[in-house]
Image: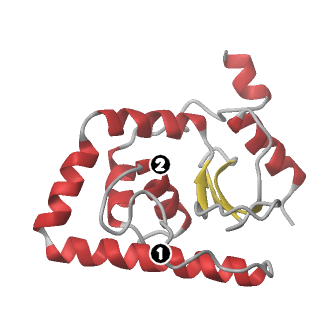
Amino acid sequence: MVDPADLAAVQAQLGRPPRGVRAVAHRCPCGLPDVVETSPRLPDGSPFPTLFYLTCPRAASAIGTLESSGLMREMKARLAEDPELAAAYRAAHDDYVTRRDKAAEEDGLAPLPRDMQSAGGMPERVKCLHALVGHELAVPGANPFGREALDALPDWWADGPCVGPCAEERA
């Protein structure tokens, strides 16, 4: 059961009610959730392959800046040139799918098809740093590109919580 205060914070972060939240997968240093674990299927049964969903708008904005810098193109090029990196990225994909399948089993749901995407373009592309960072925050050490992107981010939490009374006072 997810704490109603955490769900309210996530709703404020997203600007809409969150769907399929199973747990808070990571907390920002400010104390609020910044990554939630979601069910592999939404309440209506439709597939939702993003197991770790980044919710913090400040982190998302900072990651968007990284994405627009061309970092993903550089990462994808390195993936083709570095077999060790490619193997680590494939291991990240395998970790993600294994955790997603376990979540489905725990929720009494059919797992998603094995050939369905995991997240962020894994294992062959680098498509969404938000998903890769979410994975790395939820499972430290699991995602090499998530770690690289996370290391390149500014301290998005430094000004305090992104939502709630403290955030509204700063606005």
Q: CA distance from mark 1 to mark 2?
A: 21 Å
- Determine whether, in the image, residue 34 is placed left or right of residue 78: right
Query: Picture quarter containing residue 62?
Result: top left
Q: Which label sits on residue 130?
A: 2
In the rendered view, would you say 122 is above or below 19?
A: below
Ranked by sequence position, the earlier of labels 1 and 2 is 1
Residue at the (16%, 56%) spot, across then down:
77
> For the N terminus, which image quadrant?
bottom right
Q: Which residue is mark 1?
A: 115
Label 1–label 2 contact, CB within 8 A: no
Task: Give x and y (percent) for residue 118.
Answer: 49, 67
Q: Label 1 is placed on what type of residue?
A: Asp
Residue plotted at (42% across, 40% down): 63
User: Which residue is at a point 62% across and 80% down the rendered structure image?
Assistant: 101
State left or right for residue 142 relative to residue 7: left
- Density class for disc 1 (Cα within 10 Å; few <14, some 14-19, many ≥20) is few
The amino acid on which the numbered mark 2 sits, given as a three-letter code, is His
Q: Residue at x 66, y 63 (%)?
A: 47
Specify whether 23 is left or right of 8. left
> Measured from the top left, where is residue 117 in percent x and y?
48, 66
Question: Along the line of sight, which residue is nearer the eye, 70 or 113?
Answer: 113
